Amino acid sequence: MSLALIRLDDRLIHGQVVVGWGQPLNVGFIVLVDDEVRNSAWEQDLYRMGVPANIEVVFASIAEAERQLSGWEQDARVGILLAGDIDTMAALAATGQVKRVNIGGVHHRAGRSERLRYVYLTDEEAAKLLSLASNGIEVTAQDVPTARAVPIREFL
């Protein structure tokens, strides 16, 4: 199969990803791309606890993910790739191998304004997402699979 979902979600692995997306997609693996988590055994253990044993969890740095993207796309199983921030997603997109990005949850912090009820962005973050879209990447926001995928031009 391939990476059925390439998702930007600052919560990374949580129930909405595992149950809401993972079950309907029949996911066999989840790739979590985050340099800090990649180097933290206890954080990896925490994230693994929320994933059924039949789903492999791969923790990758940005550099490792850039090298492994094509392999994950060619994996016989269905996979989800998660990044927790826009800069990580932009780095992966710069490889030319990312064709679509799902904005699943970017939550409120100082300096961010609400774009959708589950997407809060600074103007700089919004510009980075628009840049991805202008480079031919399909960027949509969709918190759960039963919701409508909102094209970037509708929320920015």
Image (spheres, grey):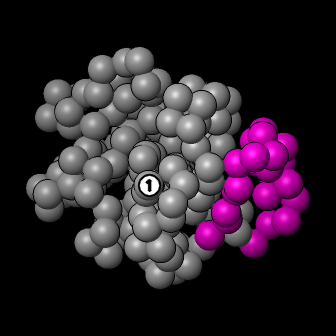
Q: Is residue 28 left or right of residue 155?
A: right
Q: Residue 130: image x %, image y %?
A: 19, 50
Q: Is residue 69 left or right of residue 48?
A: left
Helix, strand or loop status at disc 1: loop
Q: Residue 85: image x %, image y %?
A: 48, 53
Q: Quick check: 50 above or below 117?
A: below
Q: Is residue 21 left or right of residue 125?
A: right
- Nearest the viewer among 45 and 55 is 55
* Quadrant in the picture for the C terminus: top left
- Nearest the viewer among 47 and 72 is 72
Residue occupying image coordinates x 33% and y 33%: 141
Residue occupying image coordinates x 64% and y 35%: 18
Q: Is residue 59 left or right of residue 115?
A: right
Task: Tell me the quarter of the picture where residue 146 sits.
Answer: top left
Residue occupying image coordinates x 37% and y 41%: 102
Q: Residue 70: image x %, image y %?
A: 41, 73
Q: Is residue 56 magenta?
A: yes
Q: Label 1: how many residues lie within 10 Å, few (<14), some (14-19) or many (20+)?
A: few
> How many circles with numbers are drawn on the protein?
1
- The reply to whether residue 107 is in sight is no
Q: Is residue 97 magenta?
A: no
Task: Tell me the quarter of the picture where residue 90 sits.
Answer: bottom left
Task: Tell me the quarter of the picture where residue 2 sits.
Answer: bottom left
Q: Quick check: 25 above or below 98?
A: above
- The reply to whether residue 142 is in sight is yes
What residue type is disc 1 on?
A: Met
Q: Which residue is mark 1?
A: 1
- Magenta stretch in the rendered image: 39-60
Q: Residue 25: image x %, image y %?
A: 50, 36
Q: Quick check: 39 above or below 89?
A: below
Residue occupying image coordinates x 31% and y 62%: 98
* Quadrant in the picture for the N terminus: bottom left
